[in-house]
Amino acid sequence: MKFALFSQVALREDIPNYNLKKGAIATIVDHYPMPEGQEDGYSLEGFNVEAITVEVAESQIEAIKTSVLQLGKY
């Protein structure tokens, strides 16, 4: 599994069926492993649309890039 359950990801492309745009952020709630040679799938929730779960292929999502806060010694 490339993405961990309950991690946040961003869409790599628009999903017109749900009026979701590239860059929209959601949380992974399920993972669908596929046989070798096929792409794994994921269920996403938490878009600005309530009560929907969107199923996507692994290639349609990406990890959210977070900046790391570096703290100096005090």
Image: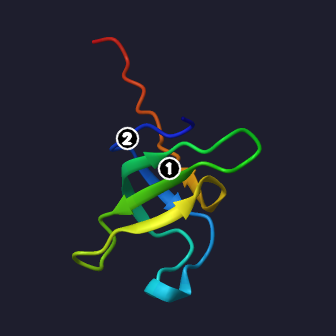
Identify the residue shown where x is 34% and y is 68%: 53
**Quadrant into which the N terminus falls:** top right
The circle drawn on residue 64 is: 1
Nearer to the camera, 64 or 29? 29
Where does the image place residue 4, in percent across and percent down from the top left?
A: 43, 37
Is 52 above or below relative to 1?
below
Q: Is residue 39 left or right of residue 19?
A: right
Identify the residue shown where x is 47% and y is 43%: 66
Is 9 above or below relative to 70?
below
The circle drawn on residue 5 is: 2
The circle drawn on residue 35 is: none
Is 3 above or below relative to 19?
above
The answer to the question of whether label 2 and label 1 lie on touching residues, with beta carbons closer than 8 A, is: no
Q: Residues within 10 Å of mark 2 (few under 14, many from 20)?
A: some
Q: Is residue 10 left or right of residue 25?
A: right
Sequence-wise, the earlier of marks 2 and 1 is: 2
Report the amino acid beneath label 2.
Answer: Leu
For residue 14, what is the image quadrant?
A: bottom right
Residue most toward the front? 35
Q: CA distance from mark 2 to mark 1?
A: 14 Å
Where does the image place residue 49, in percent across and percent down from the top left?
A: 29, 80
Secondary structure, mark 2, is loop
Residue most toward the left? 51
Residue most toward the top? 73
Report the amino acid beneath label 1.
Answer: Ile
Secondary structure, mark 1, is loop
Q: How is the image coloured?
A: rainbow
**Quadrant into which the C terminus falls:** top left
Where does the image place residue 15, in percent across and percent down from the top left?
A: 55, 79
Where does the image place residue 57, in percent across and percent down from the top left?
A: 60, 59
Identify the residue shown where x is 77% and y is 44%: 37
State the count of labels: 2
